[in-house]
Amino acid sequence: MKKKILFWIIITLIAFFTRFYKLDLYPPSLSIDEVSIGYNAFSILKTGRDEWGNFLPSSFRSVGDYKAPTLIYLTVPFVKILGLNDFSTRLPVAIFSAINIFLFWLLVSRFIFNKKYSGLAYLSTFIFSISPWLIIFSRSSFEAVVALSFLLANLIFAFEFRKNGRIKDFIFMFTFAYLSAITYHSTKIVVPLINVIFILLDYKCFVGYLTDWYRESKIKLFITTIIFIGISIFFIKNFIFGPGSSRAGMTLLTNDFDYAKGIIPKLIAHPLFWLTSTISLISFWYKRFLEYFSANFYLSSGLGLSTPLWPGQGVIYAIEYPFLIVGFFILISLRKYFDSSISQKFVVSILVAWFFLGFLPASISNNSQHALRSLNVLPVIAILISLGIIFAVESVKKPIFKYILSAVIIAGYILGIIRFVDFYTLHYPIELSETRSYGWKQMAIYARDHHSEYDNVYVDPRFGSSGPFTFGTPYLYFLFYSQYDPSKYINDPRRKEGTNFENYIFTIDKNWPDINLTKNNLYIASPWNFPQWLLESKREKFFVQFINKKSGIYAISN
């Protein structure tokens, strides 16, 4: 009992320092998605409508990608209590990340590992809690972390249902599956497939439960069936074929640049274009799928915390990689480690299916090795690593070598954590500050305090040190940090055609130094919009430099 209390004290400290400590400072700025989530939550709180005036929408139009609704609604009470700020916007995901640790513990200790090997539950939970894969996404507003919570809860009730056959467990199983599926796009694919496999692996048992329910209460079974069908129709209509599918459609593999611009143009003149393009697409997908089993994803580039083409941080610590490989072979060859109260074969089959299906959504999207879209597979990865470590330590017979191996593993983790902290707190915020739209917060706060001094404030949404190639949504930063009244913004007639409000004008269609020179205007844009002499003159009112010391964003008056 004392060991268990000590374990949870350690886990609580880990959760606090990795999820909540300086949450508003690391990463150093809210991303575009985060300010969108925060302001839409603020708008729902104040008006019951999103920024476009839609009443309690099931999908948020936002900047055109139709965000999943769950996280925005979950953010509303935090904005109500703490106000609209960086901390309140990020706090819900940090809390769900901490909850994930507890849910993972429940899953592995009650349903995955054999009680004889209880150490595996402690070890895998510890590995899960310190995972860089989860930590990095826990400190920003990423729906995938919340979706993972619902996925873990779904599987807990699925195993409970498989054990006891109670209708209430099935209802909870379905409820959390639905919540996970509407929270993030990847889980729309993963969760239904895992649950279908869960039932099909022992369909006779499920049919038997249905028969028992029918005998016990026909009315209860009928009502449950109607609710199940109704919710399924609503889900398919709104999140598979409706507005909620827009983001998924934008990120499909067929829209990948390498495929659409590199492969298709070479095949379009072929007489059997439909056949060759289909074969090429399958081959292209298979290559992308295999990339999630490449060492670089796990060891150097998976999280992308450094400049492209330079070594970075993988999704796991380097010391864990050999044990991950060993753990996979242990999974498919040794069943003694797994719970036998249901069926060891059943547990292994679920883990194997989860492992491969977890990478499926990411592999059919238009990015290579996307850590966020494959986050749902992390629990299996933690289980495999713990299996590999326990097996390796057990395999060493002599105590001296066992101590040496344990010391190497501990040292490997210490070095890995130091390396991750270095990348996350130094390299990432410095080298990649502009990729998170750094600078718009500071500029929005300056404009909030001074915009009334000017006739108009013109803002160019293009930014970046390399030129006018990256487009942002700065209007959301100006709304967020001024806490602009959502009802005024929604009812502004200009909202139907653009994003302008008050005297802010967001445009790229002007020659910046020559706009209304007879008026008292402020121009906010990147330095390549202005001639050098203007940047060095007294007309410069405010300047935000990227943390990597490259050119940032200027505010120039005329």
Image (cartoon, rainbow, N blue to C red):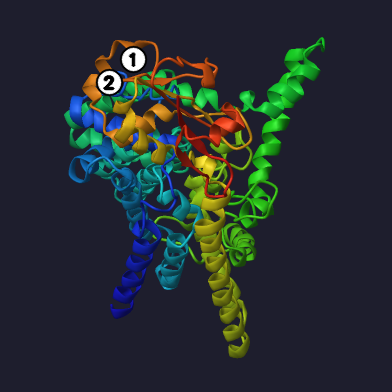
Specify the quadrant of the image occupied by residue 244. top left
Secondary structure of residue under mark 1: helix
Query: Crowding near pointer 1: few (<14 within 10 Å), some, many (20+)?
Result: some
Quadrant of the frame with the N terminus: bottom left
Residue 77 in sight from this viewpoint: yes
Residue at the spot of label 2: 489
Residue at 48% across, 35% down: 538
497 in relation to 392, above or below: above
Left or right: residue 250 compared with residue 226: right
SS of the residue under disc 2: helix
Q: Earlier in the sequence, mark 1 or mark 2?
A: 2
- The answer, for residue 157, to whether it is visible in the render is no
10 Å crowding of disc 2: few (<14), some (14-19), many (20+): many
Q: Amino acid at mark 2?
A: Tyr
Marks 1 and 2 in Cβ contact (< 8 Å):
yes
User: Which label was assigned to residue 347?
Assistant: none
Q: For the image shown, how many numbered marks are present on the structure?
A: 2
List x then y, in percent, for residue 138.
41, 51
Point 62% across, 62% down: residue: 321
Q: Which residue is mark 1?
A: 495
User: Looking at the image, which is closer to me, 210 or 42?
Assistant: 42
Separation of residues labelled 1 and 2 (CA atoms): 7 Å
Q: Which image quadrant for residue 12?
A: bottom left
Give the residue type at disc 1: Arg
Position in image of residue 264 (x %, y %): 74, 19
Nearer to us in this view, 108 or 202:
108
Q: Position of residue 453 (x, y in %)?
A: 31, 27
Please indicate whether residue 211 sits to the left or right of residue 523 in the image. Answer: left
Nearest to the observer: residue 144 or residue 396: 144
- Tell me which residue sits at (51%, 62%) in the image: 421
Q: Position of residue 235 (x, y in %)?
A: 36, 24
Q: Residue 448 falls in which quadrant of the image?
A: top left
